[in-house]
Each structure stands twice: as structure tokens, then as C-alpha cells.
Amino acid sequence: MFIKISKHVRVYLHKTEQAFLEKYKNKKTFLNSQLEIDEVQIAKKLSAKSILVRKKLDSDTQFAVNRYIKEYRYVDKKQV
């Protein structure tokens, strides 16, 4: 699945990243300490892809889902 970040920017998400995004998309914010060990790596990868917004706190990291992203349905024109 592709996520549209801005007008000409789309990012691909793997199934594990999609499941993570579905799990946390309704939460306003969540902390790094609240995540499981494998979810921390997924959160870091999604923040590098600009899907999550990261805020460094004194002793922890706060994540939030980017409000401006949209799901993008990709259809390969060669297959149609």
C-alpha cells in the first residue's frame, strides 16, 4: 500500500507497517516506552518515512501519526 505524503510524494508500506499504523492511527500520541520491542523499530522506520511525527522528550520519545497523510490506491496501468 502506498501513503501519499504530499502532492508528488508517495511512500510504500509493508504489511507489518500497515498493521502498526492501523493499531495506532486513532491515538493522538503515544510514547516510545509504551511500545513493544519490535514496534519501536517500526515506529523509527515510519518516522523516517514521515508517516509518524517524532518529538524528543527528556527521558522518552513521543510519536504521533502525521495528520496530512492520505492512503493512495496504486493501480499498475500495465496490468489493466
Image (cartoon, grey):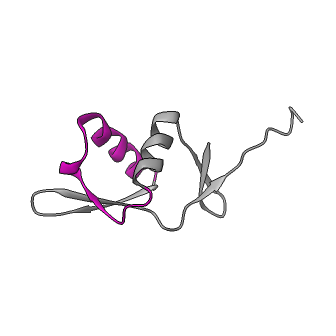
Residue depicted at 85% across the width and 39% down the height: 77
User: Residue 66: x percent and y percent?
Assistant: 45, 63
53 or 37: nearer the viewer: 37
Question: Farthest left residue?
Answer: 59
75 or 34: nearer the viewer: 34
- Magenta region's main secondary structure? helix
Quadrant of the rendered image containing residue 63: bottom left
Q: Does residue 71 lie above or below 79 as drawn?
A: below
Was residue 17 drawn as part of the magenta stretch in this picture? no
Residue range of the region highlighted in magenta in the rendering: 25-49
Q: Quadrant of the C terminus?
A: top right
Q: Quadrant of the N terminus?
A: top right
User: Residue 12: x percent and y percent?
Assistant: 57, 42
User: Residue 54: x percent and y percent?
Assistant: 31, 59
Residue depicted at 46% across the width and 55% down the height: 51
Question: Farthest right residue?
Answer: 80
18 or 26: nearer the viewer: 26
Residue depicted at 10% across the width and 63% down the height: 58
Was residue 36 drawn as part of the magenta stretch in this picture? yes
Quadrant of the rendered image containing residue 75: top right
Residue depicted at 31% across the width and 63% down the height: 29
User: Residue 47: x percent and y percent?
Assistant: 38, 52
Q: Does residue 42 lie above or below 8 as drawn?
A: above
Q: Is residue 23 left or right of residue 80?
A: left
Q: How many marks?
A: 0
Q: Is residue 59 left or right of residue 5?
A: left
